[in-house]
Image: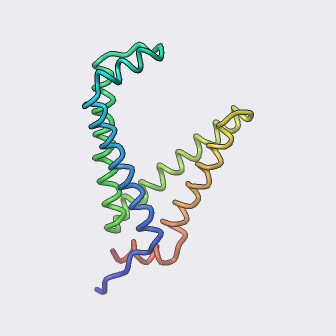
Amino acid sequence: MSQVRRPGVVTFIGAIILIQAFLSAVVAVVTLAFKDRVTDFLAGQGSTTSDASIMGTAIGAAVAALFLFIVGSGILRGSRGWRLFVVLVQAANMGYALYLMITHPHSAFMTSGLVTLLIGVFVIWALYGHKESEEYFERA
């Protein structure tokens, strides 16, 4: 079986997911490293927070980083399961953005919703509507 070259749009999406994983890992490390400063800052903003909630945030960011790394790696390897998962998450995100745009038409949700919809359309097109992507995921 011949090796199929990964399309640039698939590489782009996989790379973006891996960058998100890296940034989530940075958030986890920085939150743990500066836990006391984060708590003081949030208290100064009027937030009632605790060490446990800061620790939960750091753990959540670490879990997200691990999960994003697995998903990004799967996309770059040509996993059809992760491909479908990414599209389903994008579709749910687009649906929620559309809901917010309808329920809050005179707010920042309009702008962020439009951006979310455009990104979602691009991701879905790149993973399912692009001929080279289809060939890549079929043969990978």
Nearest the eye: 33 or 108: 33
Residue under the point 31% across and 83% down? 3
Which of the 4 image quadrants contains residue 60?
A: top left
Describe residue 52's horizontal placement relative to residue 126 as left or right.
left
How is colour applied across the structure in the image?
rainbow
Location of residue 105 with respect to 117 vertically, above or below = above
Location of residue 127 with respect to 60 vertically, above or below = below
Quadrant for the C terminus in the image: bottom left
Describe residue 39's horizontal placement relative to residue 123 as left or right.
left
Describe residue 29's horizontal placement relative to residue 120 as left or right.
left
Residue under the point 39% across and 75% down? 6
Nearest the eye: 89 or 46: 46
Residue 18, percent from left and from top: 35, 55
Describe residue 114's horizontal placement relative to residue 140 as left or right.
right
Nearest the eye: 2 or 8: 8
Residue 5, percent from left and from top: 37, 80
Residue under the point 26% across and 30% down? 32
Residue under the point 73% across and 35% down? 105
Q: Residue furthest bottom?
A: 2
Nearest the eye: 56 or 74: 56
Q: How many marks?
A: 0
Quadrant for the N terminus in the image: bottom left
